[in-house]
Image (cartoon, grey):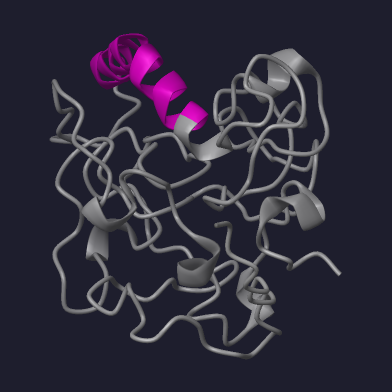
Amino acid sequence: MASCATPKPTPSPGVPVPTPYPYANEPVFPGPGVIGPQPEGIPLHACMGLNACAGADRFGVLGAPGREPNACAGQGYCATGTDHTCHVQNECKGQGGCGLYGTGEEMNNPGANACRSQGSCATPINAERFSTNGPNRGKSVWLRARAVFEANWEATRAELLAARHDGKLASGQPLPANLGAPPAAFAATGPTYLWISDDNESRGNMTACGSSAMSGAGGCS
């Protein structure tokens, strides 16, 4: 017999959920606009697991408090491009998310836009966000962004090798031959709203509205 239980309502802002907090062993999200110093010459990126080199993530070359910097491409915690909240607000190539607005082609290439103002929606890309157009419609934006990043990795590495040859990267900058996995707690989903919002205590950390109310975050009032 089917259950008639009433679904639990979405928690109100400021109500911690769930207990215990599932990311207690992860570094705390630094907050909107707080991005650590980056390796010189390494491109900025739109979200977790999309970094092209060691030390290129939200915490930067210093690492999260009490931790070493991430050690490899693809292992980084969250975006390094300037946080933004909507379509076409990205400052450079590779810094656009996707979710609510944009063409099907744009939404099928999150984190891989070719130029400033060509990104389809906000960053960071919270795990709850899904595409509303194109081949990825109804599916996770972050999982698509990671798949695109993996598919483009060889070309990205070739560009970095050429930049190092031309002296555009800091001397001694390592360029890993292979991609690492994203942080294990988020490898199947990407960075969740619960982590970005610091246990749902402050919606001020949620800059990535993405698909508005459809993002699962509820942070776009």
Residue 174: % across, % down: 14, 33
Q: Is-magenta flag for residue 210? A: no
Residue most toward the right? 221
Q: Is residue 125 left or right of residue 204?
A: left
Q: Is residue 28 above or below residue 178?
A: below
Residue 59: % across, % down: 34, 63
Residue 200: % across, % down: 56, 80
Residue depicted at 24% across the width and 14% down the height: 165
Q: Is-magenta flag for residue 165? A: yes
| Magenta residues, start to end | 144-166
Q: Is residue 8 above or below residue 68?
A: below
Residue depicted at 22% across the width and 52% down the height: 184
Query: Magenta span: helix, strand or loop, mainly?
Result: helix
Q: Is residue 205 above or below residue 53?
A: below
Residue 82: % across, % down: 61, 52
Which quadrant would the C terminus be assigned to in this image? bottom right
Total marks in image: 0
Q: Is residue 55 left or right of residue 107?
A: left
Residue depicted at 45% across the width and 20% down the height: 148
Which quadrant would the N terminus be assigned to in this image? bottom right
Q: Is residue 90 left or right of residue 15?
A: right
Residue depicted at 69% across the width and 25% down the height: 137
